[in-house]
Amino acid sequence: MNKKVSLKEIVGTKIFYAVILVSYYWMWARSDWKEWYSTLESLLGFFFFCFYTFQRIRIRKYKREGVDELAEQNLKRCDSICLKVFIVAMVIAAWAAAAIGHVNIFGAQVIGWWIVLSILAITILRTVLFLIMDNKGV
């Protein structure tokens, strides 16, 4: 636990939050019920609470240590790129929902999956872009 906290670690762990979001959406959007679903929900909630608490401790430790300004700038660049990509994905989702909603080809769950999986993809893209930029020292 005495290991120095890097911005790579903090950015990379955001993927776990996106995976938890996708898992919870699956739980909300499903149409069946099995006995073990409630156990899975409880375990996932407990894991999220523990992970969030641990993450807060690591972020607080990172802020007390010396901040890598180049890494911070790279993260801002990655966030800017990912915001633009995410806006395009959400515009496509909104137009698809409006256009396809008139003919009832698929329901709201498909658009929900589009949004949630877009969040997961953007989180992974952000991490990969940041790692590439940080390793090259851009």
Image (cartoon, helix red, strand yellow):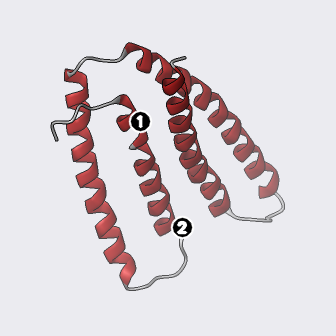
Mark 1 or 2, which is nearer the eye?
Answer: 1
Q: Amino acid at mark 2?
A: Ala
Residue labelled with disc 1: 11
Q: Which mark is residue 29?
A: 2
Q: Which mark is residue 123?
A: none
Viewer-proximal residue, 26 or 127?
Answer: 127
Q: Is residue 138 above or below residue 10?
A: above
Residue 93: x, y in percent? 70, 47
Please identify the quadrant where the C terminus is shown.
Answer: top right
Q: Amino acid at mark 1?
A: Val
Disc 2 element: helix
Is label 1 in contact with label 2 (beta carbons under 8 Å)?
Answer: no
Horizontal side of residue 84 vs 52, given as left or right: right
Disc 1 element: helix
Residue at 41%, 49% in the rendered image: 17
Residue 85: x, y in percent? 66, 33
Horizontal side of residue 113 vs 67, given as left or right: right
Residue at 38%, 85% in the rendered image: 35
Separation (CA) of disc 1 from disc 2: 28 Å
Q: Earlier in the sequence, mark 1 or mark 2?
A: 1
Horizontal side of residue 102 vs 84, given as left or right: right
Residue at 74%, 65% in the rendered image: 106
Total marks drawn?
A: 2
